[in-house]
Amino acid sequence: MRALCWHGKGDVRVDTVPDPKIQHPRDAVIKITACAICGSDLHLLDGYQPTMESGDILGHENMGEVVEVGSEVTNLKVGDRVVVPFTISCGQCWFCQKGLFSLCDRTNPNAEMAIKAMGHSPAGLFGFSHMLGGYSGGQAEYLRVPMADVGPIKVPDSVTDEQALFLSDIFPTGYMAAENAQIQDGDTVAVWGCGPVGQFAIRSALMMGAGRVIAIDEVPERLAMAEAGGAETIDFSKTDVYDELMARTNKRGPDSCIDAVGCEAAGHGAADAVFDKVKAAAFLATDRVHVLRQAIMSCRKGGTISIPGVYVGMGDKLPIGAAMNKGLTFKMGQTHVQAYTKPLLEKIEAGKIDPSFVVTHPASLEDAPEMYKKFRDKKDGVIKVVLRPGQL
């Protein structure tokens, strides 16, 4: 089959690789009909996520048609159209039983590697390094899906691929980010980053009763999409974000702040952002945490910081004293996707949201290397790329 493979920092290629096979009775194999490039995939492209190996197949936003099932998979049959959560979860361990699916205790075969880095191991993830399981991703023609009796959900014919695909990751991720922000009716919510997750966080916050959402970015297309979703906007390249947020909130600050950027915050716009970029380039730090610092300083006293943006290692000079003295609450984590897929599918079916709004660049799998670079470099108005394997 054809698959998008990682070969080193800045080097991804579409290669011909062996087809996946059933390896366990709880496996399924799906033929990918649509997959997408996620902002966190750029951390792999840019070499921030450790334990990648040349030839690893990328991609964790996947859907397709079931072509084979293991003997213990009774909820799916050949021909079913399904969306696959990016978190691989057993459904049976203590964490899964509590609905904390991204913290599954059983699906990372390389748990010891993760424990050394993090203290404990999270769940295995598709296409996201050997520390997180070494599972092949779905930017490919076919995908082996472990624990297929727990993760994939069937998609009704009334819902298109572009509407359903993002149940794999970014819609639940944006929704959980808003949920973690502990929004009360009428609250002001600030969202850093108007990429795909930020766009869903904006719309989710408004669905949850936020009175105002203030979105922060510098890319015109992203800011325009945020405004179309009901947000006010701040262009951080033109305005001091802290000062502007204070002016718009009568100096109190937003009630909640959502960091939808993560470890690769822009290396300009503020002195500490430039400092972060220099340290990362010199391998003196792994994560550029300018956005998280800014959110801590901007959030109102007693407010909440929600972090859906991916961080991979150590952040430098976080103002923990400010966070403690302001009494801030932090909620963060990889998304418990299986807890959200069915209720969010119901919202799509009810017409409360059409997730396809975020798609700007449909493309073939063969176009993936070029689209990765356009997405990373924010060129050609790219916000979200959907890839169609098998199509030119």
Image (tube, rainbow, N blue to C red):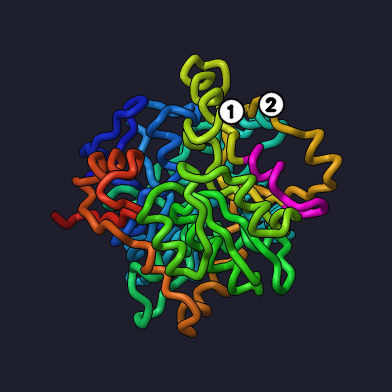
Disc 1: CA contacts within 10 A as few (<14), some (14-19) or many (>=20): some
Left or right: 283, with 334 as reference point: left
25 shown above or below 128: below
Left or right: 15, with 150 as reference point: left
Which is nearer the eye, 103 or 45? Answer: 45
Residue 272 drawn in magenta = no
Amino acid residing under circle 2: Lys
Q: Which of marks 2 and 1 is in front?
A: 1
Left or right: 250, with 387 as reference point: right
Tell me where residue 372 sits by quadrant: top left
13 shown above or below 368: above
Q: What element carries label 1?
A: helix
Image coordinates of residue 71 in percent, x first then y, are 47, 61
Q: Mark 2 points at which residue?
A: 317
Q: Name the residue under label 1.
A: 272
Image coordinates of residue 388 in percent, x first then y, are 25, 57
Amino acid residing under circle 1: Asp
What residue is shown at x 50% (from left), y 58% (from top)? 233
Image coordinates of residue 116 in percent, x first then y, are 67, 25
Specify the segment rendered in magenta: 292-304
Q: If you read the primary sequence from the N terminus, does the residue marked by circle 2 or circle 1 appear first? A: 1
Disc 2: CA contacts within 10 A as few (<14), some (14-19) or many (>=20): few
Image coordinates of residue 208 in percent, x first then y, are 64, 72
Which is nearer the eye, 136 or 361? Answer: 361
Q: Can residue 111 be seen in this view?
A: yes
Q: What quarter of the picture does the C terminus occupy?
A: bottom left
What residue is shown at x 58% (from left), y 54% (from top)? 191
What residue is shown at x 54% (from left), y 63% (from top)? 202
Which is nearer the eye, 330 or 90? Answer: 330
